[in-house]
Every structure is written in C-alpha cells, then in structure tokens.
Image (cartoon, rainbow, N blue to C red):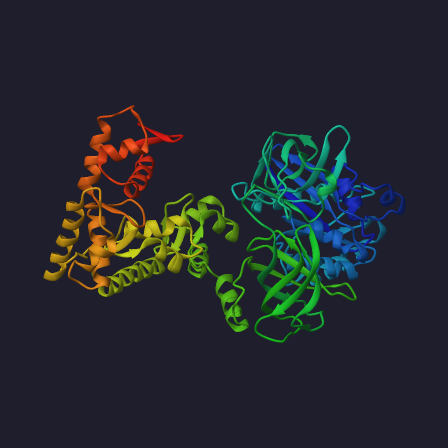
Amino acid sequence: MRNIIAGTAGHIDHGKSALVRALTGIEPDRWEEERRRGISIDLGFAHLQLDKDLRIGFIDVPGHERFVKNMLAGAGGVDLVLMVIGADESIKPQTREHFDICRLLGIKHGIVVLTKSDLVDPDILELVKLEAEEFVAGSFLEGAPVVAVSSKTGAGLDGLRAALADLARRISEKSADGPFRLPVDRSFTMKGFGAVVTGTLVSGRVSLEQDVEVQPGGKRPRVRGVQVHSAAAREARAGQRTALNLAGVDASELGRGMTLVEPGTFEAARLFDCEIELLPSAKPLKHRAPVHFHAWTAETEAQVRLLDREVLQPGGSAPARLVLREPVLLLPGDRFIVRMFSPVVTIGGGTVVDIAPPARIKRVDAAKRIAALAKATPAVRVETFARESKFGCGRRALAARTGLAAAALDAALKSERLQVLPGPEPWVVDRAWFTGRQQSLHEICAAFHRKNPLLPGVAREEVRTREFGGAPAFLLDEMLRQSKTVTAEGEFLRLRSHQLHLKQDEEEAVARIEKAFEEAGLAVPATAEVLAKCGVEAARSRSLLQILFRQRKLVRINDDLIYHASAVDTLKRLLASRKGERFSVPAFKDWTGVSRKYAIPLLEFLDRERITRRDGDERIVV
C-alpha cells in the first residue's frame, strides 16, 4: 500500500474543509464549535482510498490568521499540498502566508485547487486561474495542475481525484527504514483504553507491544494498540496517519509538540545550528532577535543568533544558531518556521544543520562550519563529528546526531578517515587522531625510560588519568592493543624495545640485596638497613629493590617486612604438611622459630593468601 499525506492550505472560508469532506466523505471538523461557527479552528483528518494500492491521508488546516500555529502543527508532515483558492475571492492574505509556509517547509509537490467554481461564471473562473498561475510562478507549484471544483455540486472532483492519484504515484514515500519518529499532534484519554496519541508517522515504523520513548521527557510507555487511518493494525509505517494507545503513561503527560521515538535513540535539544531564510516581505531580523519557533508539531519561543552579520535583510539567508526556550526533538535536515513576536506573522524559516554544535567557537568559525556541513555528505558529517569529539563517538550517539538510518550510517563509517573500535558499542574515532595519540603514548614511554632507566615503565593509571580522563575505559586498552611500539606489562606501560641494562655496581647491589634477604630466612632485617649496605645511593637502591619484586625473588608482606621468595615457599610447605590442623600464635612461633614481631604479620599474610583461616584466637591450615 502506497501512503501519501496531503495537506490543505489557503485563506479562511475558501472551502478547504468542504473540499476534504467532498473528496473523502469524512467530516474533518472535529469540534462542535467548528461546525457551529463554520470555520476550522484546529487540524482535521480524513483519508481517501484512491485504489487498492494507493491511499491518501488528508490533514485539513485552519485558514484563519489566529490559528496559523495550528496550521503549522500539521503542515510539517505533508508530502503534497492542495493550495486552495476560492474562485469567488482569488488570492487573499492567508493564501500568501500559507503558501510562504509551504515553500519554507520545503514541500515540493502540490495541486492548485480553485474552489467554489459554482459561484462564478466561466470568465471569472478563467481570470482566477491566470492569477493563481502567476501567483505560484517560480515556486514548487509552477506548472502544477490547476483544478476547478465545486464541493457543493461535485463538479471537478473526479478530475481532482485523478490529478491526486497521478501526483501521488510520482512522488517519493516517507522512509519506513529510517528511525522511528512520530510527532504528536493530539493526545487524549479514551474510556476503557487510556492514553491515545495521534500524528503523522514521518519516519520508520511502530508495532504492537513495542516500547517507545517520549521526547522531551524520556518517559517510556508501551504500545498496546495501533490504528492506521482509523483502522486497527499491527504495525504503522512512515507516511501513515497513526493513532497509538499507550500503556504506562497518562494522557495529561503527553501533548502536541512531543515526539515518540525508539528508546535511547534521540534526545530533544534547546540549541541547534541552522541556515535561516527571511521572506522578502519581512522586516530586517537583528542578531539575538526573539521569535516564535515552529517545527513539526512543536511551538516554542527562540532567540536567533546570527553568526556572520548583525542584521539579516529581507529575502536573504544566513547561518545562525537558535536557542530555544523549551527543548524540541530535531534532526539535521528538519525544516522549521519562525514568526515575529508582534505582530505574529510568518517571517521566515530554515533547515536544521547540527543539533549539538560546539559551545566554544567563534561566530565566524561557526558560520563557516554550518556552510560546510550543510552541503556535506553523510560520511563527511560523521567525520566532522568524530574529529570534533575529544575521544570519539559511540555509534548510537552518531545515529542520534545525524538522524541517518542504519544502512546509511554503516556506509558512512566505512570512510578511510574513520576508525571503528570494538567496545560495548562500536566506537568511532578520527583515524589521524588515533594514530597521533598512539605516537604520544610512544613519546610518553620513551621520555619515562630516559628519566627512569631502572623502572619498568610509566604507571598505566597515571597515563589513563592524565591523557584519557573522561574517555571510555576501553579506549586506551584498544589503543595499546593496536600499538606496534608500546605494550602493557602489569600495571605499567613500556616501549616494546625497552630492556633493563644494569651497570656493574647496580648488578652487585642487586646481588647483595637478594642475598641479605635470602640468608635472613624468616627473621628478616629492616629494609632500610639492607638498602643502606648494598653499595649504591638510596634512589637507585629503591629502584633495584623494585626489580627484585618484579622478578618475584622478593615478596612484600607489609609496608615494613620483605621476605625472600624461597623463605615464603619453605613456610608454605611447612603448613601444607599440617593441612586441617588448628593452631595458635605460640604454636606458630615454635614451628617457625620467629618472634611475635614476625609471627603476626606472617600470619596475616597467610590469611590473605588463603593458606590459613582465622577462627577466634586460633587459625586453621586450609
């Protein structure tokens, strides 16, 4: 089934709702007040099955200038517009504003519909047709069908249906393969069912029992019912008018302007970079001017920060940063509308370029960056974001930042300028940065070896804290795994080429230190005393002691006591022969011949090694 969304546009009382009613047989005016007053106040919805494989969903918008914000809530999701012009009145102010909005939103297809054809004679109708063609000249509607109809008599409706069918088959559908996004245009409580939201599914798909996320806010309800164009369904796809019955959330917590997305994919933003365009009919727009901001179904206040000038002249465009009063879920490529504060009229619009731009950047540099990103390929955009990130980006973050579908993102990640690292999720870094940081690790280790030739290497955690503070833990590990010159050895990093070369006096000192502890057995001398007699100065003697620890020839029992490994092995064999035996501290002293000064630290060491287990005042050989 091919699904296309058509929206109406035009001045009040030019017959938009009557046209939808005549085409579909469905009443789009939902409120009693609308029917009583004969004017649309809010969005109306209907659908038309043109044939077995083509369905048109209609969004009928109000034409009164006071309700343009409601019109904007429905205009963002349309694929084609029915530009309605009353044959009895021709072009009017809201015809122009609605037309401007359609152009600013990037709508590319439509039909000009001359309504109320029964109220004028053929000559007047032909004149209005000429005026309409002149009105849309140079726009996306230039050359579009111009169809005269009467919703009252039915004249021209078959021709309009045929034109709709022809156009709908030629335009592209919204992508069901993209990320799921449903901007909410209505929320209400249905008795016996609970919270219900409706909207035009602009991307992806959603199905029964699926968990979704509400942005902004982050609530995660479950879909327990799906309707597509008022009929129950198991799944809704992009391009369909969709209603979802949600469990786990109250209708009062939902509203127009929110967006349903797949959990953990996107997050609403208060600030974004864009290209903004000012209508020729608007007044000059100053840097930091306040505006009313509209995107999809959302409306909030915003401040426009121009980046390459102080004033944007009518008819011009410029790179800008918009700061929103309330967060809105946006993606690159989304279109938006800005309206003046007073009087509240449409003055321009634009295209979102980046939803998470760098905070600390000069205005002129930000302007150049926007210009580059606006025309960049997906691969270049991903390269830019990875390069700008201090330690790279996770794949999920890049998907949220770019709005790319999975296949498109995977294709972008194959760029030669990127390196994708394994981790809890694929981690993307700039290849040149990765190579540079590996070289930095080499230089850090080389400098350490030159300064500390007797030490094994620089402490791994020191490097992680100093050079990779805030980075994911696996990043340094992966960098080391791929390094050809630096390796990790225990808790230290060293050059693979680094070897320990002792001077003659150092070799002699190492032998003296080891011999002193070996001959002492379990009644070891003070460490300071051994080092003082080894024959080299204190700094080198401490480094030599560390060498013996690394070679596992010495064992540190506590801060004060060090034993030769052979003495510890002898003690372990002694206890192994007494497995299961219960003993006291005095008995241990008798077995080993050591004083209490040595016995207690040795027993605590044996407890830690799980060779013995303390039980009250006694111990058991495990």
Q: On screen, 11 above or below 28?
A: below
For residue 586, which quarter of the picture? top left
For residue 253, which quarter of the picture? top right
Q: Quadrant of the N terminus?
A: top right
Q: On screen, 305 above or below 17?
A: below
> With 94 as the anchor, is 234 left or right in this view?
left
> With 180 as the anchor, is 415 left or right in this view?
left
- Can I make out residue 281 in this image? yes
> With 356 as the anchor, is 77 left or right in this view?
right
Q: On screen, 333 above or below 609?
A: below
Where residue 495 sits: x, y (%)?
23, 57
Q: On screen, 197 above or below 309?
A: above
**Residue furthest bottom in the image:** 310
> With 226 as the anchor, is 25 left or right in this view?
right
**Residue furthest right in the image:** 36
Front one among 409 and 169: 409
Q: Residue at x 74, y 41 (%)?
A: 252
- Can I make out residue 91 in this image? no
Q: Quadrant of the C terminus?
A: top left
Where residue 211 sits: x, y (%)?
59, 35
Where residue 467 sits: x, y (%)?
38, 60
Front one among 513 and 189: 513
Where residue 280 sits: x, y (%)?
68, 70
